[in-house]
Image: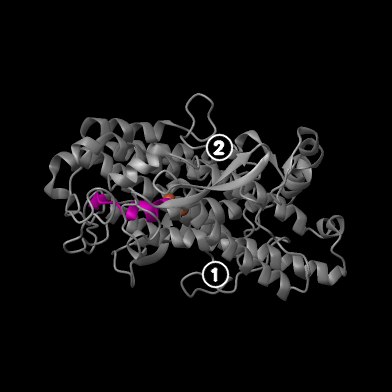
Amino acid sequence: MTINYNERIPNNVSLSDDKQLQRALERWQPKYLDWWREMGPEGFQSKDVYLRTAISVDPQGWAQYGYVKMPDYRWGIFLTPPEKDRQVNFGDHKGEAAWQDVPGEYRSLLRRLVVTQGDTEPASVEQQRQLGRTCPSLYDLRNLFQVNVEEGRHLWAMVYLLMKHFGRDGREEAEGLLERRSGDSDRPRILGAFNEKTPDWLSFFFFTMLTDRDGKYQLASLAESGFDPLSRSCRFMLTEEAHHLFVGETGIGRILQKTCEVMKRINSDDPAKVRSEGAIDIPTIQKYLNFHISVTEDLYGSEISTNAANAFTMGLKGRFEETKLKDDHRLATATYPVPDLAGDAIVVREAPALTALNERLRDDYIVDCQKGVDRWNKVLEKGGTNQRLRLPHKAFHRQIGTFAQLHVSPEGRVLTEAEWTRHHADWLPGDADHAFVQSLMKPVTEPGKFASWIAPPARGINNQPIEFAYARVD
Ligand SMILES: [Fe+2]
Ligand SMILES: [Fe+2]
């Protein structure tokens, strides 16, 4: 399964054996590069960046590190090796051999799953394209660009599936993925959170911690798919995704660490004083957390969904770690607790587990996020403060599903319109918070130096020292 780098499109799928597909992808490649130059990281296209490139799909040693100019990055098509005798592991077709081709009757739903996933990948690159100009260090700049080129590669992964398995429709969808634009009112990206701005590095770290984690849960569910090429694509994407989550979690962790150091030094946790020292106060960090988790929770969709039930029953999209779950993997009679409204109270009722799969995946995701918040709170504890971060109630600030009609506090109390108007600025970042965070966004590009609001990382990338020149920006 080593990757062939001698071809225009690096791949481990024997692309040269399928001339028609190879030609279609080679026609798409320059359009992708045009998109990257137009919508990729602004101001750094000709700079050397210390990036990792996939050279095999083995869990050990799949990456190679070296200086690359981003437009020269070897984006390619990498699937994990086939699992011998793999089966469809859930739904109506459980026990049948996994599909190597798209089952005709499931074509349109499967295409929509691939397109929706694929659309998020370039969207996040677009959202983050201005951040390089305000990097807090070369180390962070490099991590941003690593995330960006890998999101570009994830787009390649989905485009490969579209072109190989969905004929002319797939080729049209591949074009569409380069035509939509994050935040564009005429041709927006498909999902709401991917049309939000990522205007500063605090947002970036929360995005990679929380919204890339949605990516992890979506990819993990698609990795269970009975459609084997999708499963194998997503499995390799997950290995790349782990780094994105690392960037987010450690980014926020380092911000908290720095805030604690400042609070200790000035012997005060007064937000105004913390801010005047050029650090970010904990209440502001909490507001950003509230915003990013709530828009990301919306990505899982409505609590009750027949689409989700169909995707499962058809064997296209499983649950998180489907094969490790101990049940019949068909869910014909199982139930799952979903939130509902009784008057203006939030209650829980049992719903058919099949239609509640969105809610279940969202719950799995929230459990994972809570673990991350617990680790952040360890940083705060070690830093000598009593302040803690908290995940808001899952009904807080939701735009999709049962809670979309309601105003709910972070504690889960249903509010009147007047109460919401009075308090929402305590819970979500407002103009003044954004302006303050923006005021900190000054580039730091001297090797080994870091902005005032973030601590250095515990270690460098690929055993390099922290003061290594992770990008050559001059
Ligand atoms: Fe991705
Ligand atoms: Fe990602």
**220 part of magenta stretch:** yes
Instruction: Give percent across and percent down for residue 397.
Output: 65, 42
> Mark 1 or mark 2: which comes first in sequence?
2
Amino acid carrying mark 2 in the image: Ile
Per the image, the residue denoted by label 2 is 400
Ligand 2 contact, mark 1 (Cβ < 8 Å) = no
- Identify the coloring: one colour
Instruction: Give percent across and percent down for residue 443.
Output: 66, 53
Question: In the structure shown, which secondary structural element does the residue marked by tag 1 occupy?
Answer: loop
**468 part of magenta stretch:** no
Q: Is residue 184 left or right of residue 121?
A: right
Label for residue 27? none
Q: Is residue 412 left or right of residue 306?
A: right
Amino acid carrying mark 1 in the image: Phe
Number of numbered discs on residues? 2
Q: CA distance from mark 1 to mark 2?
A: 44 Å
Give above or below for 42 relative to 175. Answer: below
Per the image, the residue denoted by label 1 is 468
Neighbour class for label 2 at 10 Å: few (<14), some, many (≥20)? some
Q: Nearer the viewer, residue 357 or 22?
A: 357
Instruction: Give percent across and percent down for residue 60.
Output: 33, 73
Which residue extends farthest top? 186
Task: Give the residues in magenta.
Answer: 218-229
Ligand 1 contact, mark 2 (Cβ < 8 Å) = no
